[in-house]
Amino acid sequence: MNKAKLYWNKMSHGQRHAIETAFISMIVTCLILIMISLSYKTYATNDYWAIYVGDDKVGVVSSESAANEVIRDVESHFASKAASVEQISVQPSLSKKIVEENKSKKIKIDSSEGIVNKILTGGVDVKEHHVVAGDTLWSIASSYGISIDQLKEMNPDKNLDLILPGDKVIISSTRPMVSVHVVQRVTTKESIEQSTRYESSAELYEDEEQVKEQGAAGVKKIVTRQTKENDRVIANEVISQEVIKEPVERVVVKGTKNRFRYPLGGMISSPFGMRIHPVTGAYSMHTGIDITGSYGATITASSGGRVSFTGYKGGYGNTVIIDHGNGYKTLYAHCSSISVSVGTTVKQGQAIAAVGTSGVATGPHLHFEIIKNGSPIDPQSMLR
Ligand SMILES: [Zn+2]
């Protein structure tokens, strides 16, 4: 040390300066070399990333962001599009690991879609089909929803054209390599059925209805927490329901007006139905009601309509038939006189004939029928 100091002191100023300059430039060169080697290292080591399902390497991509994207794509594959995802877990877990470049071995890069597809379909379930008497290649293949060629591909070591009862045939099917558990919130809209309120009106007949207000169905928003295992929904929990549009009540008016009134104010001497005929003595159907009345008393139209028949009609004697529309007709028999003619439009309560004994009758009365779609019905079921 002392020797070195001695030399240094003996040197001229110029010599010292030259050594200093050489020393500094050496340091600078070293720094530059270090920097170059550092930058060369980052430049040379490409970020290759391997993707793992559990411990199994399923592929390599050329950047960390591509690796993250693959993992994200698999995770989000089973989440519904419009849902907001609360939780996703994947079993076995997906992971990424940087791959050191090895000059002697070229790294094979896979496409991201290829890796995603492999993870989503690369799992294989293997089943054995035990051949029984009556099985054919076609019946086995079709019972698993595959073709004979696919069945042969699944059994490359066997000659399937010679299968016998007791043989085993491999049936493989693909499934995702992972089980993705998704908890997501799903928002749906559902319609709310409207209610109907009935009002009554004396303006309408009792068998008539009119829609006064159409109303409208409501809408509610339902938020559900849905748990999925891959494609399968395993739980659905309603979290909230909110009415976003109240239903509007439908209003229907029901008529109260009697379509038919008594055509004559008297006693019913013979009701509708089977009876022993008062004149012939035969047990037969009485197709109307008999209402007592004095000879010449006024018979009125039971309901408004158009007169469709007047005249003598066998045992009915002098008869009026009124057509009321809607399939209804009324018939008035045994009249002494008729005051309307065919084609006359009559109102409910309007005089149409007079009580008599024409036709087959034991005394003055009105035989009254209500005919619906061609068949007589019990008038008392319609009269009030
Ligand atoms: Zn009668």
Image (cartoon, grey):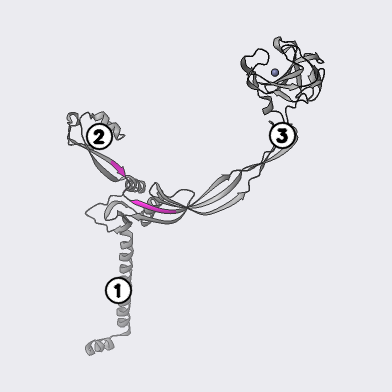
Q: Mark 3 points at which residue?
A: 255
Amino acid at circle 1: Met
Sequence-first disc among 3 and 2? 2
Amino acid at circle 2: Leu
Q: Nearer the viewer, mark 1 or mark 2?
A: 2
Sequence-first disc among 1 and 3? 1
Q: Residue at x 26, y 29 (%)?
A: 138
Query: Ligand 1: which quarter?
Result: top right
Dot 3, how many residues are within 10 Å of its Cα: few (below 14), some (14-19), or many (20+)? Answer: some
Q: Residue 181: within the magenta?
A: yes
Nearest the eye: 315 or 218: 315
Structural distance between the alpha carbons of marks 1 and 3: 114 Å
Q: Residue 87: within the magenta?
A: no
**Where in the figure is residue 341, as x and y percent of width and height?**
79, 13
Q: In which quarter of the image is residue 98?
A: bottom left
Q: Name the residue under label 1.
A: 26
Q: Quadrant of residue 250?
A: top right
Highlighted magenta segment, given as a residue range: 173-183
Dot 1 lies on which element?
helix
**Residue 281 visible to the viewer:** yes
Q: Mark 2 points at which residue?
A: 151
Dot 3 lies on which element?
strand
